[in-house]
Image: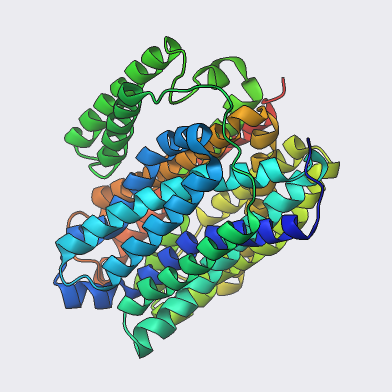
């Protein structure tokens, strides 16, 4: 039976959106606090990178197994457990006194995030009629983008006036509000009525394959990076063969084999994040090391994209309920491609007006693509597979982000090498920026194709 929009439905949306804001808000805030955190905990460049990477890895490998647990025991239960783990790990991170403990607690935080994200979109999708699904998913996407935009400002204020610990304590407080909202407003649990078993060996193969694959990205362009990626790909292939034979698999591989819309839409999401996640990283280096902007001024340039994304996502989500979401998503991917081509022509004297225009256009493309693509994915499966579809999208996002950073780091390694980043190496860094954007442009062009043919 469909749930009609009412007051309780509005409060469910608010609760899920508040939970969705946690990770992007804290992640973008923490980026600004890393110099202070590194100094206080004595972290070197490699350890500092693992503060972010370990969380990305943990969330990616646990998302699909946690979605399966949601189907077995109830999505509401898994969502609340995930927020509780996130709250606990945020408090532990805030009280960390060494790099090892902080990295360990960030791994735990990733498990909490996987439980949240593996069920949150599924709860939203199951709670609303199909005719307004795009609107609600658009609101949720807009909240994520607004959180990304607000993160640097919040992180700068908290770090400067209170300290980096306060970022984690703020995340813990927001988590407490989400837990209260989940208990008060989410009444249904949406679990399978059939007797089910958990696919332990499939989950183990999946975790080993995906973690090996993502770890290999960090080793590019060295030969061992490619070897590790090949090993991870082999483990994932074995995982797919194993899952095809299971009666109750941790991941329904037939969703990919038999559902073309789901397969191509998920692939489009993977390509989108692979082609775009490194943009903020490379443009931050470009603006500060090549153009000489302060971190605050560079942040003001970068924030334009997130603000436009959030505003456009609100409209595109609703529009995808009335117009073809395939057309909208493909149009968005095409605009992103044009924007990336524009970045390929950056020089050391490019006008900031031109850069700002490209960022606005990029945010516009992101906003048009994201909500309709999510609407297509969630609408292409039945209710029993909502959790799986939601978790698959999250895994595509995280894997794409890792691959995108692998492209950027490979470009820097080839052109600059393993040296300290300073303004003196601006020539080599400029080459790295161009190589990264050329590679991302070609990837995005492939994404335009996969997005356009998903219904054929």
Q: Quadrant of residue 400?
A: top left
Residue displayed at 64% across by 43% down: 333
In the image, is residue 285 above or below residue 378?
below
Quarter of the image where the N terminus is located: top right
Q: Can see residue 118? A: yes
Coordinates of residue 88 in the picture (x, y in percent): 34, 62
Name the residue nearer the viewer: 186 or 420.
Answer: 186
Outermost residue toward the right? 322
In terms of image quadrants, where is residue 202?
Answer: top left
Image quarter in which the C terminus is found: top right
Look at 42% across and 77% down and name the residue there.
Answer: 155
As drawn, is 251 to the left or to the right of 234?
right
Q: Which residue is situated farthest in the top direction here?
A: 245
Residue 411 on image: x %, y %: 32, 48
Residue 454, percent from left and from top: 67, 26
Q: Which residue is depicted at the point 57% across and 57% down?
A: 182
Image: 402 above or below 171: above
Place of residue 401 in the rendered image (x, y in percent of width and height, measured from the top left): 42, 47
Please give the name of the residue rendered at 19% of the width and 66% of the height, measured from the top-left corner: 420
Quick check: can you spot residue 350?
Answer: no
Residue 418 left/right relative to 341: left
On screen, residue 370 above or below 232: below
């Amino acid at each position: 039976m469909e749930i009609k929009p009412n007051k309780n439905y509005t409060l469910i949306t608010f609760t899920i959106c508040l939970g969705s804001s946690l990770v992007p808000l804290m992640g973008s805030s923490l980026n600004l606090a890393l110099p202070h955190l590194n100094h206080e905990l004595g972290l070197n460049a490699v350890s500092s990178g693992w503060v972010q990477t370990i969380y990305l890895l943990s969330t990616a490998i646990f998302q699909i197994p946690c979605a399966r647990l949601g189907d077995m025991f109830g999505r509401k239960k898994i969502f609340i457990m995930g927020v509780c783990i996130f709250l606990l790990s945020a408090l532990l991170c805030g009280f960390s006194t060494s790099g090892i403990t902080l990295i360990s607690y960030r791994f735990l935080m990733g498990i909490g995030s996987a439980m949240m994200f593996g069920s949150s979109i599924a709860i939203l999708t199951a709670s609303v009629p199909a005719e307004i699904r795009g609107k609600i998913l658009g609101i949720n996407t807009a909240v994520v983008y607004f959180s990304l935009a607000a993160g640097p400002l919040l992180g700068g204020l908290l770090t400067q006036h209170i300290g980096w610990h306060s970022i984690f304590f703020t995340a813990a407080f927001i988590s407490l509000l989400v837990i209260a909202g989940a208990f008060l407003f989410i009444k249904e649990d949406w679990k399978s009525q059939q007797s089910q078993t958990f696919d332990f060996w499939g989950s183990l193969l999946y975790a080993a394959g995906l973690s090996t694959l993502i770890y290999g990205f960090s080793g590019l362009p060295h030969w061992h990076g490619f070897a590790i990626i090949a090993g991870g790909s082999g483990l994932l292939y074995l995982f797919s063969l194993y899952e095809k034979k299971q009666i109750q698999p941790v991941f329904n591989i037939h969703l990919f084999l038999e559902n073309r819309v789901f397969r191509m839409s998920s692939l489009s999401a993977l390509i989108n994040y692979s082609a775009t996640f490194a943009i903020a990283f490379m443009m931050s280096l470009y603006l500060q090391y090549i153009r000489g902007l302060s971190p605050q001024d560079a942040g003001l340039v970068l924030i334009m994209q997130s603000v436009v994304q959030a505003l456009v996502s609100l409209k595109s989500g609703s529009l995808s309920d009335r117009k073809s979401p395939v057309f909208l998503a493909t149009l968005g991917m095409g605009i992103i491609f044009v924007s990336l081509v524009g970045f390929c022509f950056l020089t050391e004297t490019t006008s900031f007006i031109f850069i700002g225009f490209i960022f606005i256009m990029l945010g516009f493309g992101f906003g048009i693509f994201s909500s309709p693509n999510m609407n297509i994915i969630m609408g292409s499966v039945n209710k029993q597979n909502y959790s799986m579809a939601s978790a698959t999208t999250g895994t595509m996002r995280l894997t794409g982000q890792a691959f995108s950073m692998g492209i950027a780091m490979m470009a820097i390694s080839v052109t600059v090498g393993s040296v300290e980043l300073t303004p003196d190496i601006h020539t080599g860094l400029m080459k790295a920026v161009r190589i990264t954007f050329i590679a991302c442009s070609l990837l995005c062009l492939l994404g335009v194709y996969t997005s356009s043919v998903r219904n054929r």
